[in-house]
Amino acid sequence: MAEEDPFSEAPVITAKGLRKMYGPHLALDDINLEIPRGAVGILGPNGAGKSTLFKCLLGLITTTSGEGSVLGLDIRTQGEQIRSKIGYMPEYNALDPNLFAVDQVRYSGELLGMNSKNATQRAHEVLEYVGLKDQRYRKIETFSTGMLQATKLACALVHDPDILICDEPTNGLDQRARGFMLQTLNRTVREGNRSVLMSSHVMDDVQDLCDSIVMIHKGRIVVQSSIEDLVQQVDKEIEMVIWGGASKMESELSSMGLENRRLGRVIRIKMESESTVEKALQAAVSAGVQVRQMKEYEPDLEDIFLLVMDKLGAQIKGTEDLMTSEHTGGD
């Protein structure tokens, strides 16, 4: 396959009829995929097939059947070239605590084939980029969680990859460090013209950074769409904050045939017609409760994910079930 222009509008990753068997176990089942340039969230519960898919796309394991390409390179025959264009930020900590940050990042560059001079220069550049300019000569063992995550990101960026794969990049970060990490990844996409594939259980982070998502379930792609299109497909709801008997309000709504879901004092009611608001207010009067707040609810990515998984019959109770734990072996 001819290598494509990394800044073209063509998909950065494609797969057609991709299957992977581990003995009798079907890990990937007829994967058809087109991942556009930009920031893409890769979602799915543990064991869904995310890490197996990445290993196939990177040429680390051979596919049973089907074909695919990354940046125009064939995953079956050009795995080494593909991997030279990929940066990987793992969830787990693979840093050497005894090294200075600049030496760790330089070493990562050398492992990727860079000569020592270029790797050293790039290490200084990317450490400044991720906000660690003043900590370059501190030992990694003295770093906070936020600084460790930033160092892992610098290691992934040192060779200037076209695609960055981030596994739980905001894991363990406080609000300030989380914001800076997402801002840095956003700069990498918007200003650096690079693509970021992010796997995360924090749906707010995915929604803040990504334009589209790919959702994997039991080795199959079940959703491949822009987040904007997905939000438009979800039923509109009215959100009410109830005081003085949310349970009574919930029962009253159900008795009136209004589909609803309750989260503590918050009740969301499916908007079935223009009369839904009036009926909901009548239910509040009948239940004898106070309506402290009432507004149209904007669905978020967490709602969409849980809705999809519910339709698939998966027992997913919350996004904690998305925690990535697929670093070794097959899915």
Image (spheres, rainbow, N blue to C red):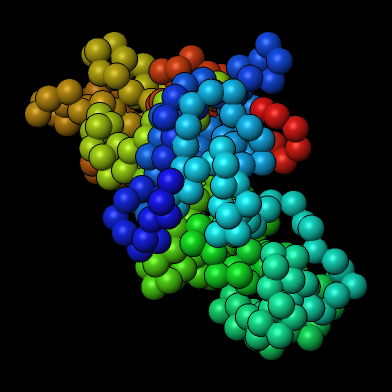
Q: Is residue 34 left or right of residue 30?
A: left
Q: How many marks?
A: 0
Image height check: is 177 above or below 249? below
- The percent position of residue 157, horizontal first and vertical second, equals 59, 68
Give the residue at the far left of this rendering.
Answer: 274
Q: Residue at x 50, y 43 (%)?
A: 74
- The percent position of residue 31, horizontal first and vertical second, equals 46, 27
Q: Nearer the viewer, residue 212 or 175?
A: 212
Q: Nearer the viewer, residue 115 or 244?
A: 115
**The C terminus is located in which quarter?**
top right
Q: Residue at x 63, y 72 (%)?
A: 158
Q: Nearer the viewer, residue 319 or 248?
A: 319
- The percent position of residue 279, horizontal first and vertical second, equals 17, 24
- Would you say residue 323 is visible in this rendering? no
Q: Residue at x 40, y 44 (%)?
A: 35
Give the residue at the far right of this rendering.
Answer: 98
Q: Residue at x 29, y 11 (%)?
A: 255
- The percent position of residue 323, horizontal first and vertical second, equals 64, 39
Q: Nearer the viewer, residue 156 or 304?
A: 156
- Would you say residue 235 is visible in this rendering? yes
Residue 5 picture quarter: bottom left
Residue 193 picture quarter: bottom left
Q: Is residue 69 left or right of residue 115?
A: left
Image height check: is 64 above or below 85? above
